[in-house]
Image: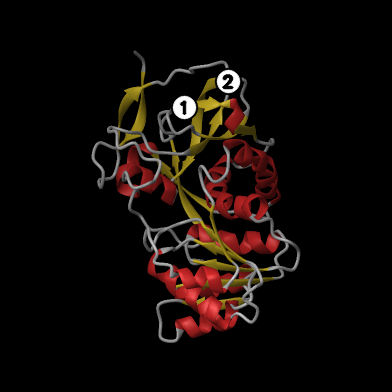
């Protein structure tokens, strides 16, 4: 059986190492084998490799990677999202389901596509599929100093939000968001943070929540306490859970306000829904309106790069 180089996870909690795995084979007429050009090292990829993502099967060894840019046999570049039940994308070759891929335009930088698509996808789909943002509405991004959160600030403005409130803990990263569309900045985890959040975000229409856990509990109380009209719909979209997997929500909160909790992720949005958004997002990246700068790393250096920190607006991209 032919083999290929790949990043291989053999123990949860440890970084993957470069190793040899069998070359995957297409299973149906919808699938084809492509040469992998670039793979983004996303938080979703890290959580999957740690066995911590809700889609994890707990089976080892595994190859991480949830999406990639690949080159087909005809030479065309495609961006694709991997099925949950196939080998990961952080490898020399990968199986692509044509129904979960989009052909990239000539001249586009494949590393930028690999770096940008995943962090942009969460807010792009949330504001176009889960709760389509209307021109002039206001959006709170909770966890705005992370890569996906900072991208959400830009995308909310790009899609027509009239006002965007950015809330996060890192002061330096928070201040930088004023240059990319944030109208109000709220630093979390400091004295009087709840009061500041309530004052800035009392009357927002949509919350993009990348935190969950205790910060979300505090934010819900702060926003609803300060809200002038509690019967006005507040769509709270749960996207990430970097601060914890659970919250405690008093029943009175749901009775005392029009708080609408919903999630955004695999399952909440169908594969067809995600696929429908890929061409428009690729077009925005190609036009330069939405960009994350890639930091290229060779596949053989994945163990050393796995825990490396990134600067705001950057993403590690593995190049086989």
Q: Position of residue 198 (x, y in %)?
A: 54, 81
Name above or below for residue 250 compared with residue 113: below
Which residue lies at the image location 72% right of the left edge and 70% below the top edge?
Answer: 162
Name above or below for residue 42 compared with residue 219: above
Q: Answer with mark 1 or mark 2, whichever residue precedes in sequence.
A: 2
Spatial CA span between label 1 and label 2 = 14 Å
Q: Secondary structure at mark 1?
A: strand
Taking 272 as reference, is 296 left or right? left
Name above or below for residue 254 compared with residue 301: below
Front tag of 1 and 2: 2
Q: Quadrant of residue 247?
A: bottom left
Task: Looking at the picture, tell me which residue is in the foreground, 145 or 48.
Answer: 48
Which residue lies at the image location 63% right of the left edge and 72% below the top edge?
Answer: 204
| Residue at the spot of label 2 | 30
Taking 105 as reference, is 226 left or right? left
Residue 188 in view, yes or no: yes
Which label belongs to residue 117?
none
Taking 140 as reference, is 24 left or right? left
Q: Quadrant of the N terminus?
A: top left
| Residue at the spot of label 1 | 94
Which residue lies at the image location 71% right of the left edge and 68% below the top edge?
Answer: 137
Residue 313 in view, yes or no: no
Q: Residues within 10 Å of mark 1 (few under 14, many from 20)?
A: many
Q: Position of residue 196 (x, y in %)?
A: 52, 83
Q: Position of residue 255 (x, y in %)?
A: 54, 70
Q: Quadrant of the C terminus?
A: top left
Q: Position of residue 226 (x, y in %)?
A: 57, 82
List the single residue furthest toward the right: 135
Q: Residues within 10 Å of mark 2 (few under 14, many from 20)?
A: few
């Amino acid at each position: 059986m032919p083999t290929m180089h790949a990043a291989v996870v053999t123990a949860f909690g440890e970084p993957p190492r470069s190793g040899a795995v069998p070359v995957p084979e297409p299973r149906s007429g919808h699938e084809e084998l492509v040469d992998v050009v670039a793979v983004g090292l996303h938080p979703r990829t890290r959580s999957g490799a740690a066995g911590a993502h809700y889609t994890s099967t707990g089976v080892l060894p595994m190859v991480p990677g949830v999406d990639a840019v690949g080159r087909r046999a005809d030479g065309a570049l495609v961006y694709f999202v991997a099925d949950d039940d196939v080998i990961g994308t952080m490898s020399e070759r990968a199986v692509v389901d044509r129904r979960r891929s989009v052909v990239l335009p000539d001249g586009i930088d494949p590393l930028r596509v690999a770096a940008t698509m995943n962090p942009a996808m969460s807010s792009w789909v949330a504001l176009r599929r889960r709760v389509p943002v209307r021109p002039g509405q206001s959006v709170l991004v909770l966890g705005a100093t992370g890569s996906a959160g900072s991208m959400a600030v830009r995308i909310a403005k790009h899609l027509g939000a009239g006002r965007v409130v950015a809330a996060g803990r890192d002061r330096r990263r928070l201040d930088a968001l004023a240059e990319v569309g944030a109208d109000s900045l709220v630093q979390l985890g400091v004295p009087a943070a709840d009061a500041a959040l309530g004052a800035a975000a009392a009357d927002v229409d949509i919350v993009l929540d990348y935190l969950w856990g205790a910060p979300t509990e505090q934010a819900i109380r702060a926003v609803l306490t300060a809200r002038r009209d509690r019967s006005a719909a507040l769509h709270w979209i749960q996207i990430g859970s970097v601060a914890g997997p659970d919250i405690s929500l008093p029943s009175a909160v749901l009775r005392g306000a029009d708080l609408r909790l919903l999630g955004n992720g695999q399952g909440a949005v169908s594969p067809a829904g995600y696929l429908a958004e890929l061409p428009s997002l690729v077009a925005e990246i190609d036009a330069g309106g939405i960009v994350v700068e890639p930091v290229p790393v060779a596949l053989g250096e994945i163990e050393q790069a796995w825990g490396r920190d990134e600067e705001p607006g950057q993403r590690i991209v593995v190049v086989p």
